[in-house]
Image: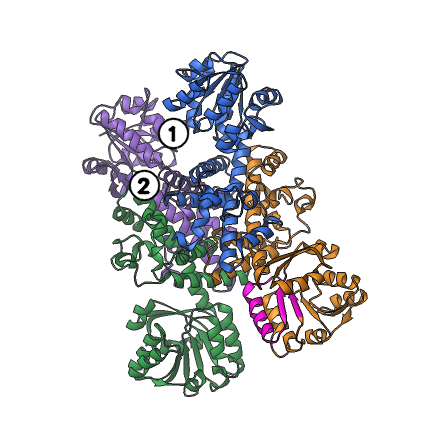
Chain colours: A orange, B blue, C green, D purple
Amino acid sequence: MNIAFIGLGNMGGKMAQNLLKAGHTVYGFDLSPTAIQEFQTAGGVVSTNPQDAAKHADVVITMLPAAKHVKDVYLGDTGILAVLPEGGLCIDSSTIDPQTIKDIAEVGKSKNIQVCDAPVSGGTVGAQAGTLTFMVGTDEDTFNKAKNILSHMGKNIVHCGDVGAGQIAKICNNLILGISMVAVAEGMALGAKLGIDPEALAGVVNSSSGRCWSSDVCNPWPNISENAPASRGYQGGFATQLMLKDLGLAIEAAGQVKQPILLGGLVQQLYQQRCLQGHAQLDFSSIIQNYLPDEA
Amino acid sequence: MNIAFIGLGNMGGKMAQNLLKAGHTVYGFDLSPTAIQEFQTAGGVVSTNPQDAAKHADVVITMLPAAKHVKDVYLGDTGILAVLPEGGLCIDSSTIDPQTIKDIAEVGKSKNIQVCDAPVSGGTVGAQAGTLTFMVGTDEDTFNKAKNILSHMGKNIVHCGDVGAGQIAKICNNLILGISMVAVAEGMALGAKLGIDPEALAGVVNSSSGRCWSSDVCNPWPNISENAPASRGYQGGFATQLMLKDLGLAIEAAGQVKQPILLGGLVQQLYQQRCLQGHAQLDFSSIIQNYLPDEA
Amino acid sequence: MNIAFIGLGNMGGKMAQNLLKAGHTVYGFDLSPTAIQEFQTAGGVVSTNPQDAAKHADVVITMLPAAKHVKDVYLGDTGILAVLPEGGLCIDSSTIDPQTIKDIAEVGKSKNIQVCDAPVSGGTVGAQAGTLTFMVGTDEDTFNKAKNILSHMGKNIVHCGDVGAGQIAKICNNLILGISMVAVAEGMALGAKLGIDPEALAGVVNSSSGRCWSSDVCNPWPNISENAPASRGYQGGFATQLMLKDLGLAIEAAGQVKQPILLGGLVQQLYQQRCLQGHAQLDFSSIIQNYLPDEA
Amino acid sequence: MNIAFIGLGNMGGKMAQNLLKAGHTVYGFDLSPTAIQEFQTAGGVVSTNPQDAAKHADVVITMLPAAKHVKDVYLGDTGILAVLPEGGLCIDSSTIDPQTIKDIAEVGKSKNIQVCDAPVSGGTVGAQAGTLTFMVGTDEDTFNKAKNILSHMGKNIVHCGDVGAGQIAKICNNLILGISMVAVAEGMALGAKLGIDPEALAGVVNSSSGRCWSSDVCNPWPNISENAPASRGYQGGFATQLMLKDLGLAIEAAGQVKQPILLGGLVQQLYQQRCLQGHAQLDFSSIIQNYLPDEA
């Protein structure tokens, strides 16, 4: 199958390589010469712009930083939808607001092109290993078509609903995640200050009603969760500035439908405070440092 | 074994009955005639005051509403520690601040009486079924002695550390729980407003990093978690006013050691708002109603 | 002087009438036929689009709902900057983010057109009476030129700094306002619940360190501040949805420079909650109803 | 007049000296030898305990750290109410919860002793200069009697309502103050980060709807308010730990009547975070440092 891949960064580059390994022909585009170089070395065909990549393709996959890039790549005279043949399929794996992809899908529909959102979780590790989770928003038919391709890059392809539902699922999940991480940070720091052994406390919480991904898989207290960033100086993992971006999407989406998210509004600012303090690159679980005296 | 049981309410009454079923002699005291009546019917020996119960006992168990009751029952001229023989064991299963039980244990130590805290989780259902979790704070020796008795009333007896550690574990767990429930409420309500099917959203969250007890076992959106209070009009479960009380303990304990808990401070007030609005008796997951338009 | 006025809504319409009264010729444009009708009756010259108005003008004033409208009116082939002669002056009195007006001023500069931001406070009452406060961002020269015109519509023309500074001042003022109103609501509601007479409490606060515009001029408790919306059922005043919009601008601007605003992030959501509950049109001081039992 | 003064610390000591200057005989008690020494030097009569002081007195004034000290001094066999003659007057100027003083007044009433609360504002500077504000809770008669004495120590004696109303007024005022200071900190820090001159911003805010005591008299940005702690390294002023204490009283009082104070709950924790970071002694306006990058 001929696939166009737009956005060959940390995530996209690794995803494209898995498509190449699976035997597909991949036409790639990125603004970064380094990204292009790596892609070419891995066997990809370099394109000079998104339209150039798309005109060879049955399927287009995009993995871009923000909504404005996605709009630029798909819409307008120089956009993909202007050249992709009828019957084509576009999969946007960027994390953006749900409305943008709905708007693009509307344009696609008028040209008989299927568009779906498929944001991912799993990070660069999952992208490399081909074990990403894709949260897909589209109709049943398009989902089945997309699933065939996505399964070369991920192992968990979830149909969340109509176009936009993938983004909604990701935004809402990360909203819950961003809050519950602060919750665990507060609980662990309080317990330690009150004198309980953090490992004993985590043991109780993880077998009780406080249990969550942030307490068992990714506990912010060092050396509780074996493979957590907290156990390696908050390196790797999910950067605070990315959590800040995703919470920004949640707040923007909530604002569009006038839905209050009280804790969401507050914790976004807490992560922003961390960034102001110079910790934007550390894993977001490092927010526990704001609750420890050493971090004055 | 001769056991004194002080506080035969919704929880204590059922716990005492499990001790009676196990063949122990239980001397019980409560201020409520109804509670006394039920206890007597179940085979308990009624005492006229805490000292009266304690003087027959090897072990004393207390299950009381607040720290002041616990102090009254243990300390002073009319308190249990004034009459319990040397070598006795006191187990306080009330949920109170960690400092109070430490103070009482100090007095106990001077009289060669072992005191431990052992707050529970599992609610009245667990109390009746004998499946409570006990979070025990005391030394190794006392823990083993206490475990023998507690195992008649619960199936999960966790040693959390020294005296007070049981209370600390419970407080910190419920702090995390109280926050993560609001997190899930915000995420589910936002998702629904944005148009995703709540069941699909819960499916994604529960297999992803937003997963927590509040999303999988006790989801606040109706009919997601089969046995959750949300699926039966928020009846039963863990009353909002009890969550409010436990968060109050967290804030009090945090204040004693000057430990900040930002989200904790806010969510306690959110639950207090729910109580002001007349929903103190509903399960705490009903806080999602504050995020829904019907609940104006 | 020939003035183009774009945006003749509740605010702009009244402002334009004050320019007409002062003897200026005003070329006006608005999408609403009703607004146009009123403007024409008051002696204005109706234009068919912004460029049509601008080409007659020495000065352009815009009063529009959001940044996208401001961009549309000034920029691009159909924008004002494409037709306004060199040496012209543009005054944008809309409340928008600071960056947008900086971008427009940059374009203006390349065409030798002066652009300044001059958002207002004072509401429709001040617009009608010609007593608005203008917060102006621009250089000294342009400020003096703008002041001559603005003084027909307001009585307090403040030079806040370079382009964008007017917006910054307004955003930051309303951020403080939006929070302090909730602060007063919490204080008044708590005092009343504890049993103090609200009038006595307001008396103490207003002569002490809790004193603020929200406590003395616009107290949210009814019948404390004589002319406050609280004393007339929260009608008139500054609609909750407008406060929500301005806090949205604060959060957006804060996000652009990664500056945390913790209380800002939370109170925006509180006002959003009020809108969800159906109170978007009430004065923002009506947020006190969320702290009163009647408002369950 | 013979006056007993219990609690001769930083505040009480200076207040007692003003009574001495006015020609009253003052019987004083304090646990600190230094405080006693200063009091004696100023002409006071030293007593060996509160009862010893009270038995000489027509009027008792107490200025103590917390509710437990107030209870200890007034109630029980060794308390003042056990020895003060009928017709005596007790004025408690400590800042405590409203309920405690109501309870004490109840006991006083049964012995025909008038008890009122009269917490102060004005700090040690006001205590020394005799310019304190007293917020008095009691009936009309007792107020007039108390006013005569309080006017030697303060210049603004406000009758807030019945017993407890003084405490309620102080608590609610400081709740509003504690929040609005953070509001101003957020607004000033955001404005500065966005590029407006802080002095220009303060000028706009102070002549607009963001105006408050925290922006005009005590602006947290250095060198805006001439005599503010911010202009002298946050020394002097109102210590963060005292604001933390007063917010704790607000939260406790709110909890007793189940009244939500959302921002109150959050900002208390923010001040607690400042204390954890080692800034308990700085003026509470130093909370702005949490919004500045230098303070990482």
x and y percent of residue D136 in the render?
27, 39
As shown in the figure, which amino acid type bears the numbered disc 2? Ile
User: Image quadrant for the N terminus of chain D?
Assistant: top left
The single residue placed furthest to the front in the displayed view is A141
Range shown magenta: A89-118
Label 2 to label 1: alpha-carbon separation: 18 Å
User: Picture coordinates of residue B21 (x, y %)?
Assistant: 52, 20
For disc 2, the chain is D
Q: Which residue is mark 1?
A: D68
Q: Residue D229 in magenta?
A: no
Q: Residue at x 45, y 45 (%)?
A: B286
Q: Is residue D57 left or right of residue A265?
A: left
- Say whether disc 2 or disc 1 marks the residue closer to the N-terminus: 1
Q: Is residue C163 visible?
A: no
A137 in relation to C36, above or below:
above
Mark 1 closeness class: few <14, some 14–19, many ≥20 residues within 10 Å: few
Asked if badge 2 and badge 1 are on a common chain, one would say yes
**As rendered, which of D41 and C188 lies closer to the eye?**
C188
Number of residues whose C-alpha sits closer than 10 Å to that of mark 2, classed few (under 14), some (14–19) or many (20 or more)? many
Q: How many marks?
A: 2
Check whether the beta carbons of the residues at disc 2 and disc 1 lie within 8 A of each other. no
For label 2, the residue is D168
The residue drawn where x is 66% and y is 41% is A225
